[in-house]
Image (cartoon, rainbow, N blue to C red):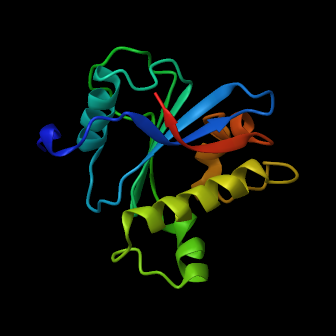
């Protein structure tokens, strides 16, 4: 991967705040298929190396087929593999279906809207987290769901 192919992150695609208005997570959205943990670690390193959101508990990188989450991994701009890596298909498929969009043929902006809808549903989720399907248990285990529940999302926030 050649990191020069990616523009420097001057703003986050999405920023999530907790219910008290405190920064909880930064989400970077890349409309790229076939990524790897190593690619994700290098991209995150590149973002941090250029001053992007160093002190955040959760850093989320979403692609149409993979989701990478870092939890409290520090502020150093070194490649650190994600704490969690999950298949994005089960999470995002209902949103692609409802919008009538093929995830292999989607514009970057449309993909950002799909991810924003998924995150907004997480923020507004009701009830207990105890009954999440096994493939979604990482949301509770990581503390991500508790951190963003009843919070808010902002779009394209400057670093």
- Which residue is at a point 61% across and 81% down the rendered structure image? 98
Is the residue 55 above or below the residue 79 in the image?
Answer: above
Indicate the position of residue 69 as horizontal and vertical percent values. Answer: 47, 39
Residue 111 sits above or below residue 106 on the image = above
Q: Residue furthest right?
A: 127
Q: How far across and down, in percent of the image, does residue 124 sit? A: 79, 52
State which quarter of the image contains the N terminus: top left
Residue lying at the far bottom of the rendered structure: 100
Task: Left or right? Give the position of 61 relative to 121.
Answer: left
Residue drawn 44% across the image and 16% down it:
74
Quarter of the image for residue 80 reads top left
Horizontal placement of 53 versus 79: left or right? right
Q: How many marks?
A: 0
**Residue depicted at x 31% and y 41%:** 40
Location of residue 139 in the rendering, given as x and y in whole percent from the top left corner: 63, 45
Query: Would you place residue 104 above or below residue 132 in this image?
Result: below
Looking at the picture, how far across and down is residue 39, in whole percent?
Answer: 24, 43
Query: On the image, which quarter does residue 4 sit in?
Result: top left
- Residue at x-position 42% and y-position 81%: 102
Camera-nearest residue between 100 and 159: 159
């Amino acid at each position: 991967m050649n990191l020069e192919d990616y523009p420097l992150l001057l703003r986050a695609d999405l920023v999530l705040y907790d219910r008290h208005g405190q920064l909880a997570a930064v989400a970077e959205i890349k409309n790229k298929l076939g990524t790897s943990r190593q690619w994700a670690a290098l991209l995150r390193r590149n973002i941090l190396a250029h001053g992007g959101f160093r002190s955040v508990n959760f850093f989320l990188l979403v692609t149409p087929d993979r989701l990478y989450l870092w939890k409290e991994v520090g502020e150093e701009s070194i490649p650190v593999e994600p704490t969690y890596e999950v298949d994005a298909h089960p999470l995002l498929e209902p949103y692609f279906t409802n919008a009538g969009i093929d995830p292999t043929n989607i514009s970057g902006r449309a993909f950002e809207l799909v991810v924003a809808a998924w995150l907004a549903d997480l923020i507004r989720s009701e009830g207990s987290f105890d009954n999440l399907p096994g493939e979604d248990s990482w949301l509770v285990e990581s503390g991500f769901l508790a951190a963003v529940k009843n919070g808010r999302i902002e779009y394209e926030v400057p670093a």
